[in-house]
Amino acid sequence: MILNYNSFFYLFILIIILIFFIIKIYSQVFKFIKQEFYIYRLNNLLRNNYKNNCYIYFLLGVVYLDKACLKQALDFFIKSSNSYKDNAGVSLIQIYNSIGYVYMHIEEYNLAIKFFEKCIAIQPNYIISINNLAKVYEKINNIKKAIDLYQLVLSYDNQNKTAIDRLNKLLANKNLNRIK
């Protein structure tokens, strides 16, 4: 068999693709190992009666959220909320926002609204929770409320990309529906 330039070219392309997939698989394996290590270390802290369980529970929730294990993440965020004390290393707003975020993703919209509103009651200009709350209202098709909330975000931060993008999309869809 005689190898020509075309054969070398295709072989080179095949090797490049193979290297790409090996790197992708390696990064996923490394991420998994890192997550499992964090879970192991954090559980050890809990077993050894670490003084700040609220923070440990919150971090476990974050790791499980990163792993897309929403039920476990929610369980740990709720434990974090239940064990909250001042100077816990994490704010109550972050805990409530995380609980609302998980509820939003498991389509428990009324509970998501409840926790995002708790955040906003504590800190009325907490943009992350306002954006998340607007997203929930989009999902339950309360477009007017979503638009109002995105406009509220822009009153606090007129450069907020999430609010600008979502508001433009909602207003464009609203105008299209009027035309029909």
Image: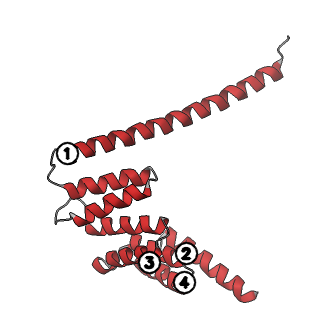
Q: Position of residue 171 (x, y in %)?
A: 62, 81
**Secondary element at image label 3:** helix
> On residue 110, which mark appears?
3
> On residue 154, which mark appears?
none
- Depth order, front residue of 153/86: 86
Q: Is residue 136 left or right of residue 99?
A: right
> On residue 142, which mark appears?
4
Q: Is residue 131 above or below residue 61?
A: below
User: In which quadrant of the rendered image does the N terminus lie?
Assistant: top right
What is the C-alpha distance between the residues marked 3 and 4?
Answer: 13 Å
Quadrant assignment, res 86: bottom left
Numbered disc in front, either 3 or 2: 3
What's the residue type where badge 1 is placed?
Answer: Arg
User: In which quadrant of the rendered image does the C terminus lie?
Assistant: bottom right
**Secondary element at image label 2:** helix
Q: Earlier in the sequence, mark 3 or mark 2?
A: 3
* Residue for badge 1: 47
Residue drawn where x is 82% and y is 14% of the image: 3
* Residue for badge 2: 139
What is the C-alpha distance between the residues marked 3 and 2?
Answer: 11 Å
